[in-house]
Image (tube, grey):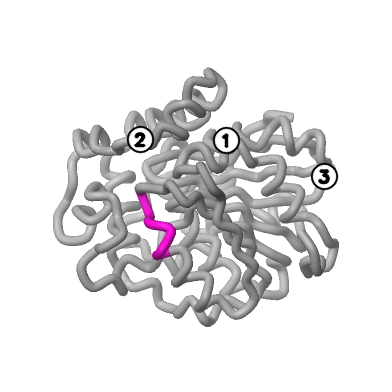
């Protein structure tokens, strides 16, 4: 399955989404990274089909096919998710968030604990507004905090060897970078607005996330230091973390997606087994 659709919100804005995997599978909401768009979820398609998972991936406001929503906050996002799942007839679901999708997954879990069964965070962004000096962040992300950045800063990704090797796979490269091109091509303003969210307080504490969290992080991640991920894992009340050797910000979801998805749906009640 690779279908797309649009849902209109009560105020008239439109949210675009794309589905991958199988239509009647275990529903998993996909939160794309930054700068990116819903087609980043192509990374999940093959393993989702094999595992019987339905991936529902949304374009955030102002990204690709979704309407720009001026002055939006992170706390606005769960209402968007609720509208989509009701439109699709989904009652309970899990969430998979890559990189900059992490705050959106956490916010949804805090707002909808009865419906979110579990979340998986892969190379997730930490609460940047809580960082004193941006230590542990790639310079690109540090500069997101005090100033409006420019697209040329994307040249400063400084890929690890493991990431560069993983991106030699044509399908993986397209999933990662075509989703970025779609985001910028649609609306630079939307991408900028998405970045502003990261620099602001989330409106809740990490400790408030009530659902089971599986946190995955590459030890070679240069975007967000593994030390930042370790700090987040300690603060989450119901978290099992896996810090992966020889894995970076891009190679982790590319190489380990099947394992990540299988782990996310391991139990129907959202509880993790004693052994991994």
The picture quadrant where one finds residue 81 is: bottom right
Label placed on residue 254: 1
- Say which of 162 and 124 sits in front: 162
Relative to residue 191, is residue 264 depicted above or below? below
Left or right, 40 with respect to 272, comes to left
Q: Secondary structure at mark 1?
A: helix
Q: Measuring 69% from the left and 43% from the top, which residue is drawn there?
A: 55
Circle 2 sits on which residue?
A: 159
Q: Measuring 76% from the left and 48% from the top, which residue is drawn there?
A: 262
Residue 160 highlighted magenta (yes or no):
no
Q: Secondary structure at mark 2?
A: loop
Relative to residue 160, is residue 261 depicted above or below? below
N-terminal of the pair, mark 3 or mark 2, is: 3
N-terminal of the pair, mark 1 or mark 3, is: 3
**Neighbours of disc 3 within 10 Å: few (<14), some (14-19), many (20+):** some
Residue 258 image position (x, y, % from top left): 71, 40
Left or right, 128 with respect to 260, comes to left
Residue 206 image position (x, y, % from top left): 48, 76
Label placed on residue 25: 3
């Amino acid at each position: 399955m690779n279908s797309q659709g649009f849902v209109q919100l009560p105020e008239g804005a439109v949210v675009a989404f794309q589905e991958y995997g199988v239509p009647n599978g275990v529903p998993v909401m996909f939160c794309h990274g930054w700068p990116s768009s819903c087609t980043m979820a192509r990374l999940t398609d093959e393993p989702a089909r094999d595992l019987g998972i339905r991936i529902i991936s949304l374009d955030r406001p102002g990204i690709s096919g979704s309407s720009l929503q001026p002055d939006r906050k992170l706390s606005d996002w769960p209402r968007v998710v609720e509208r989509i799942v009701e439109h699709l007839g989904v009652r309970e679901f899990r969430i998979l968030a890559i990189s900059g999708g992490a705050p959106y997954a956490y916010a949804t879990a805090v707002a909808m604990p009865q419906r979110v069964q579990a979340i998986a965070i892969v190379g997730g962004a930490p609460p940047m507004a809580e960082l004193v000096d941006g230590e542990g962040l790639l310079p690109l992300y540090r500069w997101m905090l005090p100033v409006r950045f420019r697209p040329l800063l994307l040249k400063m990704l400084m890929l690890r060897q493991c990431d560069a090797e993983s991106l030699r796979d044509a399908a993986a490269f397209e999933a990662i970078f075509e989703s970025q091109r779609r985001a910028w091509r649609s609306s630079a303003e939307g991408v900028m607005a998405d970045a502003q969210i990261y620099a602001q307080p989330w409106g809740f504490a990490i400790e408030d996330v009530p659902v089971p969290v599986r946190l995955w992080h590459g030890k070679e991640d240069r975007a967000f230091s593994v030390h930042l991920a370790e700090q987040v894992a300690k603060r989450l009340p119901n978290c099992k973390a896996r810090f992966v050797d020889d894995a970076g910000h891009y190679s982790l979801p590319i190489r380990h997606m099947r394992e990540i998805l299988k782990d996310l749906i391991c139990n129907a009640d959202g509880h993790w087994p004693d052994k991994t």
